[in-house]
Image (cartoon, rainbow, N blue to C red):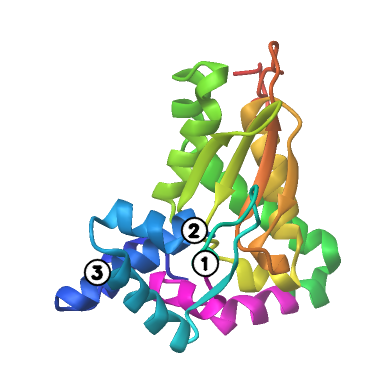
Amino acid sequence: MKNAGAFEAAVPQGHDGRTRHTVARLLLEQGPITAASVAERVGISQAAVRRHIDALVADGEATGREAPRRGQRGRGRPAKLFQLTEQGRARFGHAYDDLAVAALRFLAEQGGEEAVRAFAERRVHALVDRHRQAIVEQCEPAERTKALAAALSREGYAASARAAGAGEQLCQHLCPVAHVAAEFPQLCETETAAFADLLGTHVQRLATIARGDAVCTTHIPKSSTPNTPRDPHGGEPA
């Protein structure tokens, strides 16, 4: 399965192609987002951004919807929010191998749901353990969500963290296993449990790309005394 390493290789040649790729990536990482916000970040005119977005929409790679009203609306066209479709995410390595689904189906037939869950747990713990020291030992509790987002981005999840009410939201704008997780939700469930273990607090999964949402969103509540993350291999807590 492809990951973020495929991003740069997939960038089209030529100025127009590179700009469209940049616009598409902003829709991936920041969407839903307005054309005006994209223009501000890219540094080109709104008309040029709309031309690229219109091309993405025409190709089935992006979709738009009217932005929610805030106060009394003035003259002019109503603002629209744009984001990538499933097809649009494919340009960033969001491609899946049927072999992975077939293998998990076979595993489920032979060993049942517990076998699939054991596989999912091993997979996510291998991912998390690569970054456990940097997140748990080198970051203060208040910085761990951002550190986890950075680690997930390095793994191809295009993740970000932001304050949200009485806590934070961890957003994964790309999921390398979304198509597989749509059939095997154990992948999402074990990932959520691993995040809770790593951050040392209860977390709540609010949305997933596998269920058709635009972003995988996890809520991490604020806690003045977070739990101490346990050592997944046994022994004393980290």
Q: In which quarter of the image is the C terminus?
A: top right
- Nearer to us in this view, 129 or 225: 225
- Residue at image mark 1: 83
Q: Residue at x 53, y 38 (%)?
A: 161
Magenta range is 81-106
Q: In this view, does 163 lie above or below 107?
A: above
- Residue at image mark 2: 33
| Quadrant housing residue 219 | top right
Coordinates of residue 199 in the picture (x, y in percent): 63, 28
- Residue at image mark 3: 19
Q: Is residue 213 above or below residue 64?
A: above
Q: How far apart, in angstroms, are the residues tagged by discs 1 and 2?
A: 7 Å
Direction top: furthest residue: 225
The answer to whether any part of residue 156 appears in the image is yes
- Nearer to us in this view, 136 or 107: 136
CB atoms of marks 2 and 3 within 8 Å: no
* Residue 220 colored in magenta in the image: no
Reading the chain from its start, which is encountered first: label 1 or label 3? 3
Q: Which residue is drawn at 82% across and 77% down?
A: 109
| Quadrant housing residue 102 | bottom right
What amino acid is at disc 1? Gln
What amino acid is at disc 3? Thr
